[in-house]
Image (cartoon, grey):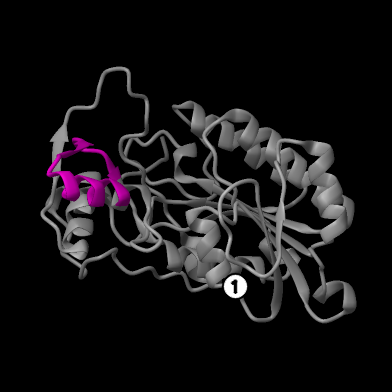
Amino acid sequence: MALGGAANGCALRALVTGASGLLGSWLLRTSPGSLEVVAAAWRGKVDWPQVVRVDLREAKRTRWLLARVRPDLVVHAAYARDRASIVAATGSVVAGAGDVGASVVLLSTDAVFSGDGSPCAEDDDPRPVWDYGRWKVEAERKVATSAGAVVRLPLLVSLEPADASTRRIRAASATSERVEWFAGERRQPAHAEQIARAIWRIAQLPSTEQGGNWHLAGAERITRRELGARIAQALDVPDPGIDVPAPPTDTRPRDLHLTDARARTRIGWHPTPVLHEPRRATSSEAGDVGVDGCG
């Protein structure tokens, strides 16, 4: 790959990891014209002029690549569900970015909290209840040592490219099968495109204002079942969803609730409800608003 741009004084250069994933693809689509963006991925198709391939778990290779690309900024959007691909990979990115003086924006998750329904602010201590959240907390700490930014995200919604829920509903509509959602599991979904644009606004802040924790919460707290119904309506297919009890062995957070005062104040974060017109909160939702403390 021939690299131009920043090295020749034309533009600041950003490296986006996880470029073949859902959020990575939206980051490429929405990238500011003022940046030269290089896409990094290990597997998967990436339709972008400048693409590099790297397994971020390989520290030596990752640091070599960052020394070659020499970005001013790394948006670490690589998604995985194993510890090495989350913790070790983030360590490699942070080390390589430090070698070349690049700032780091880590995309993390609302699942660093317990999900007991209480509101969690940017400065609340993480309290993960499952391994994925614990590994993300470890990754966040690596970024914090470099004064980088940690952006915690909710469930992302995208019809095209399709998110995981949309793929499930499309597949079920083709076979007349049902899609099972755990009863009462609630999230704050947000449009992937809106999330990507907000990430770029954070990434373009001065370094003195960029670091620390950010939350990008969706406009509503709704059940996975309701979200599935909205997706089915948007796809114009019958809703295949049914509620089922969560198995006793399931440890996922049940009701995640982020607050996002910093993003609303600093970058004007005001997301729209996903695939639906704004609705009046139910009495139970209204009652949740006053709950104090993040569990």
| Residue 192 location, quadrant | bottom left
Residue 155 image offset from top left, x and y in percent: 39, 50
Q: To which quarter of the image does residue 27 belong?
A: bottom right
Question: In front: 156, or 121?
Answer: 156
Above or below, 62 against 115 in this view is below
Range of magenta residues: 167-186
Residue visible at 82% across and 53% down in the picture:
66
Q: Residue at x 31, y 35 (%)?
A: 254
**Magenta region includes residue 181:** yes
Residue hosting label 1: 31
Q: Is residue 249 left or right of residue 207?
A: left
Using a 10 Å C-alpha cutoff, classify the residue at mark 1 as few (fewer than 14 neighbours), some (14 to 19) or many (20 or more).
some
Please indicate, yes or no, whether residue 223 appears anywhere in the rendered image: no
Residue at the spot 44% in from the left edge and 27% down from the top edge: 129
Residue 72 percent across, percent down from the top left: 79, 65
| Residue 145 drawn at (x, y percent) | 76, 43
